[in-house]
Amino acid sequence: MNNPLKTRSDLGKCLIDLLEPLKKYSVPGGFHLGNTAAHYSPKIAEMEGWSRCLWGIGPYMAGGGKLPGIDELLATLNCGVDPRDDAYWGECDPKDQRLVEMAAIAMCLLLVPEVFWEPLSETAKQNLYNWLSQIEKCELPPSNWGCFRLFVCAAFRSLGLPVNEEAERESIEIIESCYKGDGWYQDSKDSGFDFYNPMGFHFYSLVLAAFAGKQASQRKPEPAAEPERRGSPPEDHSDVYKRYIERAKEFGQRFSAWFQHDGSLIPYGRSLSYRFAAVSFYSACAFAGLEVIPWGEMKGIVLRHLRHWFSQPIFDSAGILSIGFNYPNLIMADTYNSPGSPYWGLKAFLVLALGEDHPFWQAEELPLPVQALCVSEKTAGFIINRSAEDSQILAGSVFPSWDMNHAAQKYSKFAYSARFGFCVSHSNYGIDKCSCDSTLLLSDGNDYWRERREILDREVGENWVKSRWQPWPDVDIITTLIRHGDWHVRIHRIQSDRRLQAVEGGFSVSCLEGLRLAKPVSSKAGKSEAAIAFPSAASRIVALDEIYNKPADSSKQVDVRIGELIKPAPNLNIIHPLVMVPVLRGKLEQGYTVWVTAVRAGDSEKVFVEEIPKWEDTLV
């Protein structure tokens, strides 16, 4: 995309360019953007692809933008909510995907009723109200879906339409039940802590708070009337919206640590195909007038992030956003990723609703602070380490109770990197098909590998995180991850009742240079160490085991782990389609073993020459 993405008008043009290729895929009721499946029907997926575009269209038009093809857009809306039309979107079931998509329509009713409501006929208005009001009656999962109902209720209230206040209160209670403290929401009970915190809960709650404040300021005093004739006034949830604002303030400064200086972001958890939706948190902060970090830094994070994404091959040959992360990749997809799902990223364009005179647009774009940063997220269960070379998570987080696609690789690896990404698995059979990076894989001899999954206990310090896990009931492991500058150190205290084979991986590093395979600048694989360096980056893993495992009889040798270089199957890494991983391979005997590992990845000229962390520095 040939767009500098520096100004408000640049961002508006970017949106129009994103929407333009969709027109040729218009069908009654939505957009048919592909033939891959999600867990809901292809017809619902067509509706989803259409509705998710509204997250960008509404703000664009609210900011004065003129949208080509608005008549066709409104025709789709009218047909979709008309029970007599063949393109009718239908009646919703409990926990139905269509309930999710109602929020984007409600957002447009809140932002630009003069476009999405006032021109409609009375019949069309009634149809739209009837269709949206299903969310007030349907069962919702106890998750961020409660926000979708609140959007619809807010839209109804803004238009003077009846609101089911009991359903509204229920949704507020759902959201409160998901809040776990320290600025963190958890998307349903025992789910992981991930991007649904900033791009889901905080985004929706900030937008709702902004509209509630606007409606309160515009509300006229009601004339005196007899109580029995007035009916019940709308409930005042101002205390709820104040809590939403305070939670966003608490979270906003720490979230900036996830972003690297080039605009990239640490990929972690599910829904990564939504890509730039993650930065919508700061767009919502700006929309709500909330300066959680200086306006210039906020503007820089949003625009650099978008520039980063639009320099990646994230479109298919027709110009449609693909399922995947840095490139089209169905292997890493979630079961709810339809061809239109990635357009949820358009939530980042909410800043288009703000005028040129808004402090966000008036501010000079500023870079991130240059100093290294370590953030301890004790509620979420990980620490974040940002340096000049990379932003990384050292994780001991909650494993989601819902075992979605690649849950172990998306939540339970030891480390996640903005620069190096992470690998998912084709299979657990064969080390090249497993995601051997940033994890400890164990096998009882049949080449079938187990990884860290459910985390039984965890503890988080200022620069370390400790977790307990069991790949088998009779194998108990306590892993401590310690930040050490650009390195991190892993201590595995293993009590095993069985003999096992083990492979521990460092970060995966791209072995491509443009469209060609790159030649390694340097490599090493042998006793206690493995490392690989390409022109773009390097990765290194070193075993410090001998220090911890010296036998009482000095004449005996300690079994050391041996370094190897593994080339995983293509397309397992979500950022780089071809990678290599330095690993340590060893054997675990029955009994108690301590393994200590130092890991580093970054600039090629630094990784091989830097001093390895001293063992004294690994004591926690």
Image: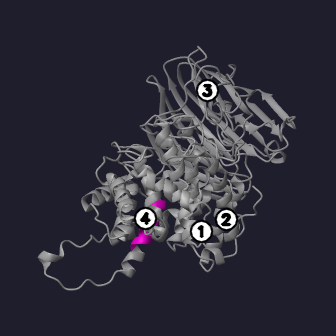
The residue that disc 4 covers is 120
Q: What type is the residue that disc 1 sits on?
A: Leu
In contact (CB < 8 Å): disc 1 and disc 2: yes
Residue 426, label in figure:
3
Of mark 3 and mark 2, the one earlier in the sequence is 2
**Of the two numbered discs 1 and 4 in the rendering, the one whose residue sits closer to the viewer:** 4
Q: Which residues are magenta?
A: 203-212
Cα–Cα span, label 3 and label 4: 50 Å
Cα–Cα span, label 1 and label 4: 25 Å
| In this rendering, position of residue 224 left or right of residue 86 | left
| In this rendering, position of residue 195 left or right of residue 229 | right
Q: Tag 1's secondary structure? A: helix
| In this rendering, position of residue 135 left or right of residue 396 | left
**Of the two numbered discs 2 and 4 in the rendering, the one whose residue sits closer to the viewer:** 4
Cα–Cα span, label 2 and label 4: 29 Å
Q: Is residue 210 magenta?
A: yes
**Of the two numbered discs 3 and 4 in the rendering, the one whose residue sits closer to the viewer:** 4
Cα–Cα span, label 1 and label 2: 7 Å
The residue that disc 1 covers is 352
In contact (CB < 8 Å): disc 3 and disc 2: no
> Can you tell which quarter of the image residue 159 is in?
bottom left
Q: Tag 4's secondary structure? A: loop
Residue, far top: 446
